[in-house]
Amino acid sequence: MMRLPAFTYAAPRSIDEAARILAGEGPQAMLVAGGTDLYPNMKRRQQSPRVLIGLRGIRELSGITGIPTTGLSIGACTTLTDLSTHRLVVESYPALSRAVRTISTPILRNMGTIGGNICLDTRCNYYDQSYEWRRAINFCMKCDGDTCWVAPSSRTCLAVNSSDSVPLLCAIGATVRLAGTHGHREIAMRDFYNKDGIRYINKQPDEIVTHIALPPVNGWSATYHKLARRGSFDFPVLGVAVAMWRDPDGTVLDARIYLNAVASAPVEAAEARQALIGHKPTPDLIAHASHLASINAKPMDNTDLDYAWRKKMVRVYVRRALNGLS
Amino acid sequence: MAGDRHRIVGKPIRKVDGPSKCTGQTLFADDLSFPRMLWCKLLRSPHPHARIRSIDTSRARNHPGVVAVLTGRDLPIPFGILPVSQDEHALCLDRVRFVGDPVAAIAATDEEAAFEALRLIDVDYEPLDSILSIPDALDPARPPIHDYGDDGNIHKLVSLEFGDVEGGFAEAKEIIEGTYFYGGNTHLAMEQHAAVAVPEADGRIRLYSSTQTPHYSHRALAKVLEMPPAHIRVIAPPTGGGFGGKTDPFNHEIVVAKMALVTGRPVKICLTREEVFYCHRGRHPVLMGVRMGMKSDGSITALHFRTLLDGGGYGSYGVASTYYTGALQTVTYDVSNYKFESARLFTNKPPCGPKRGHGTPQPRFALEIHMDRAAERLGMDPAELRLAHLVPPGSLTANYLKVGSMGLGECIRKVVEGSRWKEKFRQLPHGRGVGLACGAYLSGAGLPIYWNNLPHTGVQLKLDRSGGVCVFCGETDVGQGSDSVLAQIVAEVLGIEPIDLRLVTSDTDLTPVDLGSYSSRVTLMMGNAAVQAAERARELLSSAVAGKLEIPPTRLVFADRHVFDAERPEIGMTFAEAVQTAEAKFGTIGTVGSYTPPPSAGRYRGAGVGPSPAYSYSAAVAEVDVDPDTGWVRVQKIWMAHDVGRSINPVLVMGQVEGGVYMGLGEALMEEQVFRANRNGVHKFPSMLEYKSPTTQEMCDVTTYLVEDPDPNGPFGAKEVGQGPLLPVPPAIANAVYDAVGVRIDEVPITPEKVLKALQAKDRRYGPADLPPVTWPPPLQVATPRQGGDGRAIGRAIGRASGGTTSTPAAEPARVDGRVTK
Amino acid sequence: MSSLSKLRVRLRVNGEEHEMLVPVEKTLLEVLREDMGLTGTKHGCELGECGACAVLVDGKPVLSCLALPVELEGHEIMTVEGLAAAGRMHPLQEAFADLGAAQCGYCTPGFLLAAKSLLEQSSDPTRDEIKDALAGNLCRCTGYIKIYEAVELAARRMRSGSETAPEQAVLYGR
Ligand SMILES: Cc1cc2nc3c(=O)[nH]c(=O)nc-3n(C[C@H](O)[C@H](O)[C@H](O)COP(=O)(O)OP(=O)(O)OC[C@H]3O[C@@H](n4cnc5c(N)ncnc54)[C@H](O)[C@@H]3O)c2cc1C
Ligand code: SF4
Ligand code: FES
Ligand code: FES
């Protein structure tokens, strides 16, 4: 039986209390929400916090407030099930509801939270392995070792951001609210991530994600296309999210395209966006934009399925996403 | 035997273990615990191939909670499932042969302490050159992994010729050639292997283990522990799925038994999922070359089959697997002349062995795609081609397999009709297609694994004056429903209900030997033994009751818990009274039954693999969608007809068919046991998340047809169903992909990148290039029955050694290499 | 063994209160199986990848291998052992037994609990709804088909309140 290593468990009742404990314990402490990412990692000894700070008991972190015309605020500890079935989300942010429904399994979605999902550890199949397995390859840069086995010449870890909600949240312009011992801040979701598989989020050690703020629904439409081997359980090996604003005559006012699971951070397809803005999305233009987007993606051989094929799929999936919105 | 109208046999009644499994009452091996029980963990090799220079366990011994530590020195005697390959040690002695090979064991008061102490064992390894692919293993310059075998890393070489293959090719109008690769995959039973050993105060020992073959574990334990077998008791609790993955005696079973003897305390081990991937014994990766000669009517004048098996680090069932890749090609379509050459290779990977269909799904995949190609070449409908050349029932094949009942024709007709094949084949829009394939499997191997002339199974009945009957049998229910088959047969013959029976199974102290749940042997063999034991009991009861009622015993009917006069049903007594009557007359009532398969017809070396009392047949049509932009294959539906001889319980037979379709679907599309050759030969992803098995979202619809063509050798006519229905699924899907988009995918799994590559390739194909060269020994010549042969070999065809006639361009093996080991 | 601290936790399992001292890092799966003797809850990976360990918490399926008892105080936990009431099997258990939906039976507890939660939300689920609700449970024996049919049969029986018989094709094939 895979078991958790020993730790002490703190169950703060408020955000402030949690931030204080986190600051006090330093790097040996970690936050835990649903535990569906952290506990498997701990069982495999990829992460070994001595102190766990459970966020579930903090009321302020759960639930969804606001109205679509001015935007919604989602508590970080809202479960993926509650988020994807929430009436306002289903009606006004259907793409988000659908994206979240593609995550893991119905049972895991009852446990996993949106805060945990956006802070999800980066993934790599040289890293998501037991201690003994990793020891057999002499470990890797992300944990206990020095070399990146995916690209031995790489100076950074190339583990993959594998969240299904993140690309969509980036595309629609969601923001992340954080609280720490030094107060609160809010940053755009797209600025929350680093292209570094080890330091993959811009979060101070004592900060807690408290909310995800969804922008008002003002004429954009969005979609998310996930590529994974199976229709359940599997992390994306490619995620394509598009949010599009269009003139009544069909002209694209803006089209934000984010790719995930192809790098340590979600990748914006900026050239594709520029190519679309100001034009009507004809099949030719969509094909062109899809081609541009695919240049941005450099999948590596560290997830399921052949990486050269995955690279080819970027164009197909972006095209399908754009077609779906046009 | 009971007449044609049965009360219980043939009825879809509840599985006898259904309620206990649905309420959480069933205790599996890992559910058992005993006072003062210790927990065991194994330290496993991080090297694919290394010499062990020394092991220092002193730090681990001092870790709090640790009670005992064992290394290979404590268990020096080798073991293995086959007498010819006793090449495993419970803990490696001086050499490790794959990443995951166990080298030391720790027992501690709790599992976490044992786990922590593993890191305190210091092993000094000297890494050796590792062999990670078929070409590596064929390279005579590379070091041998074992010091036995046929040549270097060739564990087993086979070369057989039945009839005159060259003559057959000369007669042929068309010669069709192909190369195929079947990727390795594993069983992934939901239950991880567990074992608990309990020492008894008088020095005997008891082992509970999630095994499909308690008898073989029993033999290995006696050998390695050097104890009289009578002092070892092996019990197989209900097993949480096996599929062949729990049919070897395992190192962890021997280790916990030894630990229990050393510590005097019960010791448990439950492997982690990762460790289960190292136990493996799963499907061999097999590279295959097929050459088939046909007349213009499609009759097969010659078939030449070559297989290369990537065997992994140990023998396991490998010698049998090797022969199985050649044995059953002849039982579906008539083959006049047949040549089979095969080599199993040792590689530094977890050992391969038997998985559902043991060694036959790989050649079946090749053969059924080959038939599809042949039909196209001959301009025939693939169903018609097959129907025209079926092996007739009651015949003897070129390699001396006795075919009894043969319902394949009916199976083909059912799926052709049910799927509306005629309206779909080559007529569906681009991107959608149908494919047809067939299969056949054994209902039990005709010969035991170790040579003996004893029965393969036994059933013992104790009849109680209460009206209850206790049934003892060594069979092991791994989910396939063998307990229910046993209960239904005994209840049928005695005219009582399954709930009146108490089953005592798979316990080497209490039950007569049954060889185990493998080779689909249980229903046929145990069933026949059960019929015999129950009929003997019925005779005793009949004779006593007839005496008392003063009527001839032949007039008695056993039904509805009564024994009565067929002519005057009001005259009779309850079953309990009948037992009492018999007990008064004969003393305590107990009977036995046993079963030994009929002798096989082949007498040549190698003839031991393939014979069976009866063969099951299946045919499938798959309908698939292929996305031409991505290569993605989605199987919409499978129509499967299976000739089961006769269903003892149709709803359970259907469950086996559907389960076989499921597993075939997984093998066809996604399941892959692969290793990182560039990273020390580690298993690429030993987890349930990354070893892809179909979820509810991938499983296709299934329409099942049960074809009942009773076999004279089967109990009530029954044949197997547990393995056969898997076989046609992968080739039916491959053939459907061809129908949908016109590309041949000659290997499994059929992943989207392969389909896309084939769509972009000039030859519209994805698959292996030719086989790497092998120097085949001259074949053992056997005259076929048609040539008037008697089943014996004529001799070796001296001077006709066929070198690697299909020689390989230098660049090609690299691709093969890349596929096999990634 | 290596625990830094043991906690007193109070769990409500199958309607009964249990108070015990457990190391905080012991998952609900381990506590149910090893401390409470409720071995009906199974495990196939302990990493959230198979669904064998599913139990109900306040009526919703969760994975006991990734749940800590300390996080579950005050919640209602149900395991397969709690499904039958007063010696009578739940209609789902009856239907699973009738159709052989439990072959080896190792995945069965997880499926039963996930299915129970589904039937509580929808008394007449479509085949696709069943597939979606059971997408977090793996079974290697059945190909899921008898499981779907059992859920449908149980739903039908629960709606009609009677012992409806299964369809012929489900029992005998075609
Ligand atoms: C089998 C399996 C399949 C999966 N499939 C998918 C999938 O398809 N797609 C997908 O996106 N995910 C998948 N996941 C990952 C995971 O379940 C989800 O991402 C989930 O949303 C994580 O949330 P959690 O609350 O359980 O996170 P936790 O495990 O509690 O935390 C994850 C990380 O976030 C940090 N964290 C949590 N909450 C906060 C907070 N409020 N502030 C700051 N840091 C925080 C934790 O410290 C930890 O590092 C899968 C997991 C498993 C086991
Ligand atoms: S990308 Fe490289 S460094 Fe990062 S986890 Fe994978 S192997 Fe390790
Ligand atoms: S044991 Fe596999 S999901 Fe919990
Ligand atoms: S019944 Fe065996 S795993 Fe589902």
Image (spheres, coloured by chain):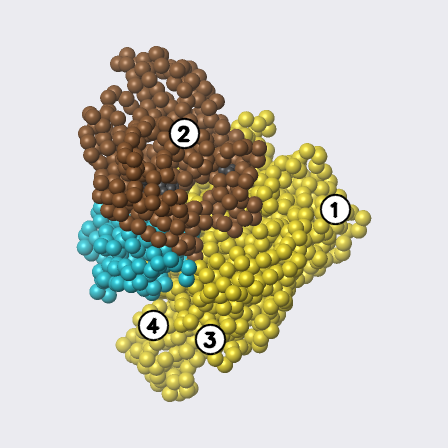
Chain colours: A brown, B yellow, C cyan
Query: In percent of the image, x 50 and y 50: which residue is there?
Result: A131
User: Does residue C75 appear left or right of residue B584 in this picture?
Assistant: left
- The answer to whether the residue labelled 4 contacts the one labelled 3, judged by CB atoms less than 8 Å apart, is no
What SS does tag 3 mark?
loop
Inter-mark Cα distance, 1 to 2? 48 Å
The residue located at (26%, 30%) in the rendering is A213
Q: What amino acid does circle 4 point to?
A: Asp
Q: Earlier in the sequence, mark 3 or mark 1?
A: 1
Residue at the spot 65% in from the left edge and 37% down from the top edge: B814
Task: Kindly identify which residue carries mark 1.
Answer: B141
Q: Which residue is mark 2?
A: A266
The chain containing the residue under callout 1 comes to B
Residue at mark 3: C-beta within 8 A of ligand 4: no
Distance of label 4 from label 3 (alpha carbons) = 20 Å
The quarter of the displayed image where residue A87 is located: top left
Residue corresponding to mark 3: B510
Residue B253 position in % (x across, y down): 52, 65
Instruction: Name the one closer to the observer, A135 or B295.
Output: A135
Residue, disc 4: B500
> Do callouts 1 and 2 mark residues in contact (Cβ within 8 Å)?
no
- Report how far apart the C-alphas of labels 4 and 1 lie in the structure: 65 Å
> Secondary structure under badge 2?
loop
- The total of numbered circles placed on residues is 4
Q: Nearer the viewer, residue C107 or B684?
A: B684
Alpha carbons under labels 2 and 3: distance apart:
63 Å
Q: Is residue B693 above or below residue B501?
A: above
